[in-house]
Amino acid sequence: MTNLNIRGIPDDLYALLKFQAKQEARSLNQEVLWLLRKSLAEMPVDPHLWGRIDNRRHKSSRQKRHSNSVSLLRKDRGRLS
């Protein structure tokens, strides 16, 4: 499992989370995870989103990469000397 640290939580929000966790007999961590899951489950998700992301990654990996500017500069400097 991965850990997530959240900085800058306003005191009033922290107090509300703590109060709600106590009301639901959960730890603060459990309450935050429950709220995150609940809010993400309610979000509409485009079923084609991951396919579009994969297509963009595939296209960008096929595109020609930029040339190495260091080698070009060295060649140009060699011409001038």
Image: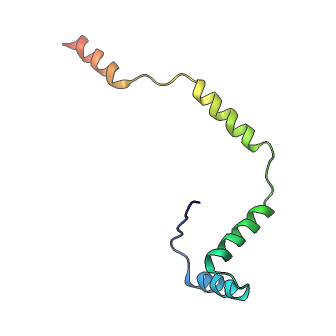
Q: Residue at x 64, y 30 (%)?
A: 58
In the displayed structure, would residue 4 be above or below residue 55?
A: below
In the displayed structure, would residue 37 be above or below residue 12?
A: above
Q: Residue at x 68, y 39 (%)?
A: 53
- Quadrant of image for the C terminus: top left
Question: From the viewer's perspective, is 76 left or right of 44?
Answer: left
Which colour assignment does the render follow?
rainbow
Q: Quadrant of residue 79?
A: top left
Question: From the viewer's perspective, is 74 left or right of 8?
Answer: left
- Looking at this view, is 76 or 15 the one in front? 15
Q: Residue at x 71, y 85 (%)?
A: 25
- Quadrant of image for the N terminus: bottom right
In the rendering, at what x and y percent does residue 73 appear? 30, 21
Q: Quadrant of residue 55?
A: top right
In the rendering, at what x and y percent does residue 46 appear? 80, 48
In the rendering, at what x and y percent does residue 63 appear? 58, 24
In the rendering, at what x and y percent does residue 60 appear? 60, 30
Question: From the viewer's perspective, is 10 left or right of 16?
Answer: left
Q: Report the number of discs.
A: 0
In the displayed structure, would residue 50 be above or below residue 62?
A: below
Q: Residue at x 58, y 28 (%)?
A: 61
Q: Quadrant of residue 22?
A: bottom right
